[in-house]
């Protein structure tokens, strides 16, 4: 299947957050027919209409009209929405496309056996997926096929990936299980939770020892993107070989002290809480009140002085 043949399909993007918006816009710009499915009263409805899409349908109506259904709404709602608004209206031969393997792997969504089940998981947030598409720069994504009811699931998935902006050479084939476990672990332990805690700890240590807050921010956060780019291009060893001698020597001495065996054991504990379903099950039970409480607690991962310095240098 090619993008041209994909244009004959009706694609329903359910959800219009950052990632859903990027995927919907990229698909449309690639010539695909896209409709948006959102709950009544959703704040995303006027955003989608302002982007040039027809007024959004309710989720059930979008599912009835679609050949391909893209799950772009929050993962913790997948099970609830699937049971009430998606499953009763599905038809044999439809394609279910997930952006994250969590709800399928952990059984919150149990798709019918007569539908294709695919995963296309971008390795970037929605804004980057859109920006890279517009600048014609490639970005990578995971791709998995869990059910091939039609015999064309692989072709459909590759065509969708191409239309969204993921070239074949940047596709990494995986499984729903491996993507779900790896994504949850990576964002909790390294990319989001671990990184935020490391930056906060470094910032507070420097400030406690008399450094101005702006200096501390610039030393522990501002240059992160440069180091990450070196790691992405050359690996950890390659990054270390390209920094100064003083930075290299300090890294070799301090790194193992900061991330020692006790930290790795706690990483294993976090992995276990993901793999055994503890974290996903708690996620699946989240209510609006719980999410509000989570949002109110985000300040624990940062520091007001750090946020002030970050705002100054972001301008």
Image: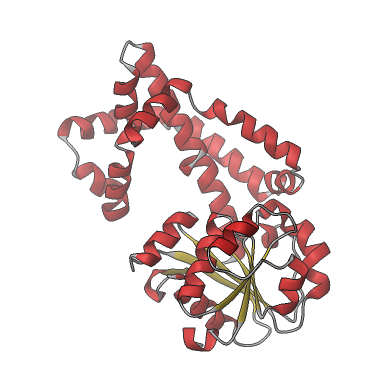
Q: Where in the figure is residue 120, as x and y percent of width and height?
A: 54, 67
How did the renderer colour the structure?
A: secondary structure
Q: Where in the figure is residue 173, as x and y percent of width and height?
A: 49, 70
Whether residue 132 is visible here, answered yes or no, is yes
Q: Residue at x 53, y 84 (%)?
A: 7
In the rendered view, tell whether residue 264 sits above or below residue 183.
Answer: above
Residue nearest the viewer, comparing 218 with 269:
218
In the rendered view, tell whether residue 289 sits above or below residue 147.
Answer: above
Q: Residue furthest left?
A: 245
In the rendered view, tell whether residue 254 sits above or below residue 232.
Answer: above
Name the quadrant containing residue 140. Answer: bottom left
Q: Where in the figure is residue 139, as x and y percent of width and height?
A: 39, 64
Q: Residue at x 49, y 78 (%)?
A: 158
Residue nearest the viewer, comparing 183 with 161:
161
Q: Where in the figure is residue 109, as x and y percent of width and height?
A: 74, 63
Name the quadrant containing residue 129. Answer: bottom left
Q: Residue at x 71, y 79 (%)?
A: 65
State which quarter of the image contains the C terminus: top left
Would residue 44 appear left or right of 159 to someone viewing this image?
right
Whether residue 99 is visible here, answered yes or no, is no
Q: Residue at x 71, y 84 (%)?
A: 93
Residue nearest the viewer, comparing 117 with 215:
215
Residue nearest the viewer, comparing 142 with 182:
142
**How many numbered circles does the render carry?**
0
């Amino acid at each position: 299947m090619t993008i041209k043949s994909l244009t004959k399909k009706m694609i329903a993007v359910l959800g219009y957050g950052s990632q859903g918006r990027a995927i919907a816009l990229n698909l449309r710009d690639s010539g695909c027919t896209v409709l948006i499915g959102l709950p009544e009263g959703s704040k995303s409805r006027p955003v989608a209409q302002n982007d040039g899409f027809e007024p959004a349908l309710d989720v059930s109506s979008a599912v009835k009209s679609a050949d391909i259904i893209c799950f772009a709404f929050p993962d913790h709602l997948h099970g609830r929405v699937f049971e009430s608004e998606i499953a009763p209206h599905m038809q044999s031969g439809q394609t279910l496309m997930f952006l994250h393997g969590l709800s399928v792997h952990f059984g919150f969504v149990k798709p019918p056996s007569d539908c294709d089940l695919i995963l296309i998981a971008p390795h970037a947030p929605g804004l980057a997926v859109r920006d890279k598409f517009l600048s014609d720069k490639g970005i990578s994504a995971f791709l998995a096929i869990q059910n091939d009811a039609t015999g064309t699931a692989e072709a459909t998935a590759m065509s969708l990936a191409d239309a969204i902006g993921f070239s074949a050479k940047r596709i990494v084939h995986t499984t729903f299980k491996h993507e779900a476990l790896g994504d949850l672990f990576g964002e909790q332990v390294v990319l989001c939770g671990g990184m935020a805690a490391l930056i906060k700890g470094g910032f507070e240590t420097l400030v406690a020892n008399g450094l101005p807050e702006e200096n501390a921010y610039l030393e522990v956060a501002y240059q992160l993107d440069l180091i990450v780019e070196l790691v992405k291009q050359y690996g950890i060893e390659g990054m270390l070989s390209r920094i100064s001698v003083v930075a290299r020597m300090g890294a070799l001495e301090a790194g193992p002290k900061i991330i020692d065996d006790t930290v790795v054991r706690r990483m294993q504990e976090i992995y276990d809480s993901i793999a055994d379903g503890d974290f996903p099950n708690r996620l699946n039970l989240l209510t609006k009140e719980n999410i509000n409480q989570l949002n109110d607690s985000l300040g624990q991962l940062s520091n007001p002085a750090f946020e002030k310095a970050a705002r100054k240098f972001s301008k």
